[in-house]
Amino acid sequence: MSEKVYPVPASWKKTAYVDDAGYKKMYAESIKDPAKFWGKHAKRLDWFKVPKKVKNTTYAYPKVSIKWYEDGVLNVSYNCIDRHLKKRGDQVAIIWEGDDPYYDKKITYNELYEHVCRFANVLKKNGVKKGDCVTIYLPMIPEAAYAMLACARIGAVHSIVFGGFSPDSLASRINDANSKLIITADEGMRGGRKVPLKANCDDALKRCAGNEKVVVVRRTGGAVTMIPGRDLWYHDEAASVPADCKPEKMKAEDPLFILYTSGSTGKPKGVLHTTGGYLVYASMTHQYVFDYHDGDIYWCTADVGWVTGHSYIVYGPLANGATTLMFEGVPNYPTNSRFWEVIDKHKVNIFYTAPTAIRALMGAGEGAVAKTSRKSLRLLGSVGEPINPEAWEWYHRVVGDERCPIVDTWWQTETGGILITPLPGATKLKPGSATRPFFGIQPALVDDKGVILEGDTSGNLVILDSWPGQMRTVFGDHDRFVQTYFSTYKGMYFTGDGCRRDKDGYYWITGRVDDVINVSGHRLGTAEVESALVAHPKVSEAAVVGYPHDIKGQGIYCYVTLMAGEEGDDELRKDLVAHVRKEIGPLATPDKIQFAPGLPKTRSGKIMRRILRKIAEDDFAALGDTSTLADPSVVDDLIEKRQNKR
Ligand code: WT7
């Protein structure tokens, strides 16, 4: 662990919202009387009815219930658009940078209003009602933000499915959410390549109820099949509806969106976020963590298919009246300088990206960065996985010219917004540490029995009390919500992460302690990859683990047992890789496949993943106790094969 400490730069002390003393004071207030604190900060939003009941939450197992601002009434799209029009109607709300560097667009708040109202009217015209779920399967184009805000405007619940998911994954999400309307595009563009979104959607809908409608946004103009009565062009529909749409009055606890995420078991679960608390938390963290001031140009490189895109491209920034940049492309197209060129082109002040991108660009050398200016940059951010100190130092020195603080922000789809993070004007930085809790967040470390550990120590990361941005339930399965997050350590929210706390009270997230892996910042359950593998006719059993990968953070290592009589060769490896990509999507592409005649199991038949992880890491000395295995010789065989790279 790096011992280096970076103080708050002098220039920040003058302009930042909070300094260290300010942080400590506000944090203490937020813990002493959460209802008072969050009642006060709810005023950052415009309410149709200001809430009087602020906090009504309990983590008591099994009666977990989370409600914030329950008597408040508001509309998210009104807060992200309408309320800004008087002061900043002509200010740019969204800068859109296309995959092709010669292709960009600027959308003002006035224009955003019109686009969102039209989109909302298109949804209404096609039968979408308050409370209905709309599935969005779009590339990173402004219409993705319009579609989200249009749903929010009419009280529909959106479920965005990342464009890198397969037709199968899309179908299961459409079915689980019972969506009757899907919004997609003809094709996406990423790194100069086309992504066949409409074709994927057609394929997915073969596995759905059959009464869905599809609204198709034209992006590339590529050929697509349009089924009359089912498929509609967005531009045709939008031309025939009014450019005004009244925002629906929503209760604070009405659902805003569902976002599917992977867990350690079963199918991905629909994380449900609601209206009032989510928006208070997303906008407040966006303001304080990024120290966002009027006029700043802010860029988060995530995709709106992930929670980072929801909270920190769309909802948080727009609620704050910010200018948010939305990027369609990838970091290395057309060259490895793309990020830095976009920063210069649009004079970006705040830049928020993922460690996997930093590591990949680090590998491309300093020259690609050095040829750009980056003078506009003031702050850098990191999210999605632990950032190794080497990548942190490179980001700080090469990208930020040693001038820009880095906010390493820890959070999850479930948390709605950032929970552990530096505040740039307040927090001394240590490379690799997400540092301290945001206001209202009470992290703790517990041992495997759930006993809270004090001081300089390591343990399982839990949160002791609720905050407004917390997920409320798993869509359609409240019991799964309670079991997944509140049953391991009773009375606490369990994050699934391991963590160390140092003598200064700084938190260092060490990664998942469950069967969730983080591949290039994308979250996957090993169980999902396993069920994709066993769906192949030649596979009888599979066990999947993560292993350290220089660029991706973690790679996907698959142990595969074949049906009797089948031969494991490179041909079959390729076939299995293609099979997993087809079942889940390209983001789940296996990195290594090891054929294994036997897997290490306990006498009761449970696969011992701990051992498989160590073998995948080439850490054969640390296998631990193997005596409880039904057949310990299996391990020797696995190691031998691993060493022979067979
Ligand atoms: C998991 C959540 C946070 C939004 C995007 C990912 C890991 C996230 C950090 C960080 C170390 C991090 C954790 C967490 N993670 N940020 N700054 N340092 N680990 O959301 O897909 O729900 O994944 O990502 O393991 O549990 P997600």
Image (tube, rainbow, N blue to C red):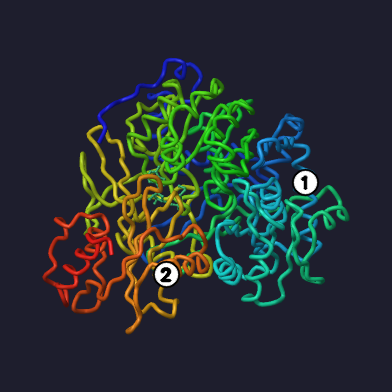
| Image quadrant containing the N terminus | top left
Relative to 608, 546 lies left or right: right
- Where on the picture, by quarter, is residue 211? bottom right
Q: Amino acid at mark 2?
A: Glu
Which one is in front, 133 or 575?
575
Whether residue 149 is visible here, answered yes or no, is yes
Neighbor class of circle 2 (other Cα within 10 Å; few <14, some 14-19, many 20+) is few
Report the residue at 85% width, 57% height from top: 236
- Residue 322, position in %: x, y? 63, 33
Judge whether residue 52 can be spotted in this image: no
Question: Label 1 amino acid?
Answer: His
**Would you say the residues marked 2 and 1 are in contact, meaning their CB atoms lie under 8 Å apart?**
no
Q: Is residue 209 left or right of residue 439?
A: right
Q: Can you identify the residue that label 1 sits on?
A: 115
Return the residue found at the far bottom.
564
Tag count: 2
Which callout, 2 or 1, points at the residue further toward the start of the chain?
1
Residue 255 vertical placement versus 330 (above, below): below
Give the camera-side residue of 421 and 250: 421
Q: Secondary structure at mark 2?
A: helix
Q: Which mark is residue 571?
A: 2
Image-quadrant location for residue 623:
bottom left
Question: Which residue is drawn at the image coordinates 40% and 33% (left, top)?
Answer: 422
Residue 205 location, x and y as percent? 66, 72
Q: Residue 189 placed where, x, y %?
A: 65, 49
Q: Residue at x 48, y 59 (%)?
A: 261
Q: What's the distance in space between the residues labelled 2 and 1, CA to CA? A: 50 Å
Q: Between 559 and 629, which is closer to the camera in this rendering?
A: 559
Mark 2 vs mark 1: in front: 2
